[in-house]
Image (tube, rainbow, N blue to C red):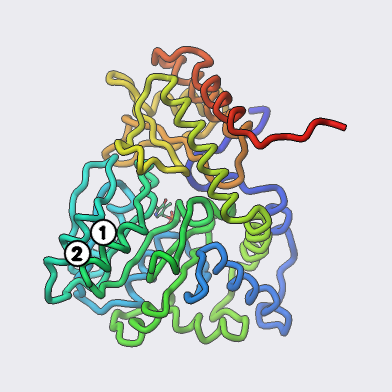
Amino acid sequence: MPGRNHLFVPGPTTVPDSVLSAMHAQMVDHRSPVFPQLVTPLLQDLKKVFRTEQGQCFILPATGTAGWEISLANTLSPGDKVLAFRFGQFSHLWIDMAKRLGFNVQYDEIPWGQGIDPNRVEELLKADAGHEIKAVLICHNETATGVTNDLAAIRKAIDAAGHPALFFTDGVSSVASLEFRMDDWGVDVALAGSQKGFMLPAGLAMLCFSQKALKARETAKCPRCFLDIADHINANKDGYTPYTPAISLLYGLRKALDLLLEEGMENVYARHARLAEGTRRAVKAWGLELCCRDPQKYSNTVSAIVVPQGFDARDVMHYAFHRYNLSLGAGLSELAGKVFRIGHLGDLNELSLSSAIVGAEMAMLDVGIPVTPGSGIAAASSYWRETAKPLAPRG
Ligand SMILES: *Cc1c(COP(=O)(O)O)cnc(C)c1O
């Protein structure tokens, strides 16, 4: 098909040209005396994205899924109790993993489209007077439903309960796009992947451990080998890695971190918020609903859009892909056919995102969903024009 593919799944996201170019480079010896000049600044700059001074970052050749396992295996012992909340496919998969690894998982079922009530976290932790719960697992941004939880409020709830549990957060679709503050929010393990807000191909898991999590590691008895961060702590202190790193991805990460830090993290958050709000204006103009029921929890990285009764969201995706070369995100698991998703994270601006809005609108019309032609993009573009930065006159 002529023209480019418009990639609007919420990961992998479009890789900026400058990042692609940075990765197109010859291999080097990862044991060479100059290799630490790449690794050490990467680990330092990553801390600026996780917003931590106290924590320690790690980069592994892996994906977000490994991040879940790294958090659990490095800090806990077999059979430990953990508290979790199931409200979408990703929170579900983390719970499923914890069970498969033999942890005692206590979890609440929350209807998909809703998020976590911090009062409930406080209540459950208060009820655990014996402090059997060793960690609280929170998916920050549930990519399946487009729901973002308030991590600051959850931290407060843990403190209000006076509970010593570790606070784990899945930030795969939030870190580097949504406001994330490791230190301020007292997060103990934060995990991310390379293919979403970091604008890279998949293949890197990036984590940050607090001092408290690093301390828990010393007594954690879970068997671990490839995912043991002890080997990274040892090798990273001299700027090396315990085994062959994904060198091309590290080159890409160098460039991606430069892009993020040049823009400034506060500006990155604001850009995602503004682009997301334009998308939501489009959804409203179409007369459709978001899967997320609580406006306080609307995700600024992904919108899951519910198709009207009698329609199948997979048909919308089918037309979008085959007619317009537009890749929309699918409804996952129990949302299959009910929603399609627009990922609005990473290397994105008003006009690139417009292609997703226009394409989704055309595909919906093609399958017979009665939206008014042009209504979505009219609403989104009006919002973006109203909120555009003032521009000095030419000349
Ligand atoms: C994508 C995603 C994952 C899974 O990451 P992989 O890199 O596919 O292993 C986990 N959690 C969330 C919230 C995600 O969006």
Q: For the residue labelled by badge 1, is the local secondary structure a helix, a strand or a loop?
A: helix
Give the residue at x 26% y 62%. 157
In the image shown, does 9 or 50 lie closer to the viewer?
50
From the top left corner, tell me how far across and down residue 151 is, in percent.
Answer: 36, 57
Mark 1 beta carbon near ligand 1 (under 8 Å): no
Q: Amino acid at mark 2?
A: Val
Residue 186 is left or right of residue 360, and the answer is left
In the image shown, does 282 or 13 lie closer to the viewer?
282
From the top left corner, tell me how far across and down residue 206 is, in percent.
Answer: 50, 65
Q: Amino acid at mark 1?
A: Ile
In this view of the protein, can residue 78 be seen by the observer?
yes
* Contact? badges 2 and 1 (CB < 8 Å): yes
From the top left corner, tell me how far across and down residue 4 is, in percent.
Answer: 65, 33
Residue 315 is left or right of residue 335, and the answer is right
Q: Which image quarter: residue 341?
A: top left
- Residue 47 to residue 329: above or below: below
- From the image, tell me which residue sits under label 2: 105
- From the image, tell me which residue sits under label 1: 95
Q: Earlier in the sequence, mark 2 or mark 1?
A: 1
**Number of residues whose C-alpha sits closer than 10 Å to that of mark 1, classed few (under 14), some (14–19) or many (20 or more):** many
Give the residue at x 21% y 46%. 110
Give the residue at x 64% y 57%. 256
In this view of the protein, can residue 5 be seen by the observer?
no
Give the residue at x 48% y 76%. 54
Q: For the residue labelled by badge 2, is the local secondary structure a helix, a strand or a loop?
A: strand
- Residue 81 to residue 388: above or below: below
Quadrant including the N terminus: top right
Q: CA distance from mark 2 to mark 1?
A: 7 Å
